[in-house]
Amino acid sequence: MTQSNQTEFPARAEQSAEAAQPESAPAAPARADRPGTPLPPSPRTTPHVPVQVDHTPTATVAHGFGRIPVTDVSPVVEGGAYAAKAVVGEAIPIRAKVFREGHDAVNASVILTDPDGNETRHDMTPMAPRGLDPWEAWVRLDREGAWTFRVEGWSDPWGTWLHNAEAKLPAGVDIELVCLEGRDLFERTAQVAHSAGDPIEASILRATAQLLIPQRPAEDLLDVATGSGLAKAMRKFGPRELVSPTADFPIFVDRKKALFSSWYEFFPRSEGATYDEDTDTWTSGTFDTCHTRLEEIAAMGFDVVYFPPIHPIGNAFKKGKNNSLDATDADPGSPWAVGSAAGGHDAIHPDLGDWESFDRLVAKATELGLEVALDFALQASPDHPWVEAHPEWFTTRLDGTIAYAENPPKKYQDIYPINFDNDPDGIYNEVLRILKLWMSHGVRIFRVDNPHTKPVEFWGWVFAQIRKTDPDVLFFAEAFTKPAMMAALGKVGFHMSYTYFTWRTTKAELEEYLGELSRDTDAFFRPNFFVNTPDINPFHLQSGNQAMFAIRALLATTLSPSWGVYSGFELFEHAALAPGREEYLDSEKYEYRPRDYSAEPNLNMLMGRLNAIRHAHPALQQLRRIDFHTVPSDSIIAFSKVDGDDKVLVICSLDPNNTVESEVHLDMSKLGLAQDAPLPVTDELTGASFTWGARNFVRLTPLQPAHILSIR
């Protein structure tokens, strides 16, 4: 944790679209992103240890106005009922409005409390416009766990005296009184510095007090009052009077992958799958045949490999090719139709392997620096063991049938949604058991299918239980839904989410959306910019224009700290199921799709380069500091991202068909530079180095649609 003016304190006492709408475990091992961690044995099930479901909400009680009013504190989520989000080392802004009656100076500080109860103080800075009283401090939290912060407003005698001195001394008003008050203030502060064990600052303060002689020229006295050494000492040891704290508000600090990661999705059953023309049958790929693909994914610099559901698939109403209802025995069915006589969510599809082969897959991924994310699709096929053992977990219609998933006019007869209201204790505890089973096999990330079709309260309970024992486990929301629901899921604990990036294509749309993500919802919503999914074949990719595929990858990797790709994107797969449909023809959801990933042309090299650039630049690993710069052409977008000394400038074409040219007008203040300063840069895509300034000319082509410039 780093921040200027930091003071140590002692510890204080005090659905996939498949299911679009209704529809005590073994100890977990060490984190799966630590290579060499041994995996536990391979049980088929884990003991069911019921946990009483407590729906009582908890919230931080906000204070009213103190002696020095402090309002509009952020980041505060639902009044403090839920923790704001941060990751280790991330710069996060804490903001508030601080003011008082009259004209005496006020100041403000942030008090951070770490998971062990130790406090540190970080002084805030007044921001523009001063008339609206905004204050801000950027802080970095240096360890995982539950933190709190509060803002303290306080009366600032040093600020008041300095303001009076700067106003009165040049005017020759009350010189003797100004000097008298200054000497008293500095002498008292010197005693504080001495008691704090800083005799040097104490000496500076006492010596400065002796220089405040009323008979000296006013300009000399003003030089004394405004000296940098004096200001430093007073900021450190000056009196803080009428201290008025807010309530303590929670921040939870996650491991870095909760914010920054590169995801690659593929279907294990397709890797190594073979087709026999003589018998018109397929042989499924297995976990063991996936190892080579893991090596290729790791070589491209991805961090997370995500698998759709790997459980047994039901036969009732099994879907055939392109979501048809006339499946044959050769059709594998949709992985999201979870459950058969072979088991449910706590079982592995027998075609893929067994627990030992799954453990080998996780171990191989860990060896390569990859982390396995597993789809958690909380729904059931009509053949799922739950249907017979727990019919109360589903909705029975008046005609006696169980309600299947629908998104009219679409019907998903192969999927039964869960009813969470008939037996919440039973289903809540079963979900917890299943999650802990997979956690015991090294899965520390879950991509949750259609969480918006389940109660928000349920997810809050699940996350609270998991966080008690395994705070490193991450949950990724597949929630393409209404903004309020997406926000609520983030607030109750989802670590990241799919977003509307898939449908944001124009410059105005992208700038507006990133402004929202980086400044309005950053306290609780972390985006993951997937460029495509098995369910979404975006209209802008359906032409197959290779430049558009490159542009979308360039934007996703630089605009968002987390991004993802579903296999086939790098091969420019784009055929649509039908005109006007954002679905893939011959969707892998319903059939085997083995691929030759080395086939030309492909985006393998570009994706690898983009991931390498992201890993090299902290600026691209964060969300909150992004600024857009002026480009007269709507076909070019320009933005910068900054984290500490690392600064990256991206200029990207939005036109995959034509060469585009324009000037780029940079706001150099956003880069911490004077407007007329030279700007030495290196293009991370080509390696070329050159010098820019505030105004620059760019020419981008479909073959070279972007510059990613690191500022030297």
Image (cartoon, grey):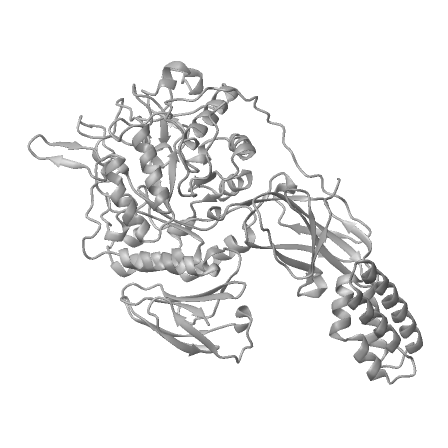
* Residue 561 image position (x, y, % from top left): 45, 54
Q: How many marks?
A: 0
Q: Residue at x 54, y 63 (%)?
A: 644
Q: Is residue 365 left or right of residue 675?
A: left
Picture quadrant of residue 181: bottom right
* Residue 159 shows in the view: no
Residue 78 picture quarter: top right
Up-down: is 31 above or below 281? below
474 or 626, which lies in front?
Answer: 474
**Residue 212, position as x, y percentages in the image:** 88, 77
Which image quadrant is residue 146 in?
A: top right
User: Vertical placement of 439 versus 112: above or below?
Assistant: above
Q: In the rendered image, is residue 318 in sight?
A: yes
- Quarter of the picture holding the N terminus: bottom right
Please tell me which residue is depicted at 44% across the width and 54% down the height of the picture.
560
Looking at the picture, does residue 685 appear above or below residue 449? below
What is the x, y in percent for residue 335? Answer: 30, 32
Above or below residue 106? Residue 535 is: above
Image coordinates of residue 223 in percent, x first then y, are: 79, 80
319 left or right, relative to 41: left
Q: Residue furthest left?
A: 278
